[in-house]
Amino acid sequence: MSGYKVGIAIVVLLVIIGGLAVWLKESQSNRIGPPTEATAGYRFMRPIELARTPMAFMPLEAGHGAGQIYLAAYRYLLKEAPDHHAMNQIDDDAYPNKNPVILHLAKMLEKAAGLKVSRQFILFDKRIPMPNIKHTTAKNLEVISTALSDLGEAYLVTKHPNHAKVVFGAIMSFGYRLWLHGLLVNIRSTGLGAMSSATAGLKQLYSTSALKNHTSKHEVDAFQRDLRTTTHRWLSKMGVIVVIDPNPGDMANVVRHDQDISWKLAAINELGIDRWATTSAGQRKAIIKLLTRLEHNTNPYIQQAAHNALSLTTVDINEM
């Protein structure tokens, strides 16, 4: 080969190598980034479950319709407490056994406790809320749980242990259904809190009241230990996903591999925020690409969450 042809070949080779280097650099810069050890491993992606169910502390279920009653109870609360002040009055009432709103909520939840839930998810919002924009549903559900827990304790103080048992059973059922049939992480967290409140009430009931029962107290203690283990795992996972500054690589990893849709939705929300938080144009582009693909997912809830995440603006971010 002549020196001229060799020179041409070398130039062409250098151009190819240079182009490949540019492509590789751009390809690397347009990635979300790798996950950290926090989301590594199969165990992190598995659903978090209760080691034992609280069925022994709940009424026997017959028929269906519990979900509709819970929705009706939620709407009733919003009607009777339309603003923050009214909601606080119900949440902090020192005499819950004399509050007609709390007593009516108790009747509704007691009725629901004896019925089954027929749908996969109990949805208190028509649409999945925007990421981290003021979302009060979980807080309002917590008000219901707190008000009824206070009512159960009031019944213990006034020596009505059987009434207290019914109320605590209704709270346990309510919390367990939120845990099983809630779609969003914060709703399911409220379910764990409600079960914890019911457990504390039942423990007091079987320790100090006319219904004192060592066997029942032992069963409550065992369930309480399992509930604490589950709650610890749940909160630990929240500490990775639902945080101020999540790792985009971890969020993408959760979206792709987590077996629980609640965490997938939470991670999608965080990616919507990360899109604006990142200083890397390439990473922002990669996040948008992933969210755009998720808008066409076969699961409608993932579609909706991805659409919400893509719809976030800098104004929304500044209001958080």
Image (tube, rainbow, N blue to C red):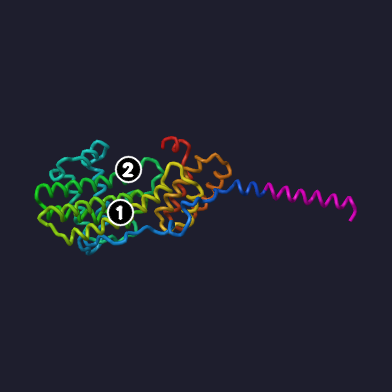
Looking at the image, can residue 295 be seen? no
Q: Is residue 316 above or below residue 179?
A: above
| Residue 228 numbered mark, or none | 1
User: Any magenta on residue 229?
Assistant: no
Q: Secondary structure at mark 2?
A: loop
Residue 28 on image: x %, y %: 61, 48
Q: Quadrant of the N terminus?
A: bottom right
The majority secondary structure of the magenta stretch comes to helix
Indicate the quadrant where residue 317 lies.
top left
Name the residue tied to disc 2: 136
Residue 265 on image: x %, y %: 42, 51
Q: Is residue 115 above or below residue 280?
A: below
Q: Give the foreground label among 2 and 1.
A: 1
Left or right placement of residue 233 versus residue 66 in this view: right
Left or right placement of residue 226 versus residue 268 in this view: left
Residue 216 on image: x %, y %: 18, 60
**Magenta segment, which residues?**
1-22
Instruction: Measure how far apart labels 2 and 1 are at the Cα level.
Output: 25 Å
Q: Is residue 102 above or below residue 64?
A: above
Residue 63 on image: x %, y %: 23, 64
Three-letter amino acid code at the position of disc 1: Arg
Left or right placement of residue 9 versus residue 215 in this view: right
Residue closer to the observer: 280 or 68: 280
Residue closer to the observer: 312 or 165: 165
Three-letter amino acid code at the position of disc 2: Thr
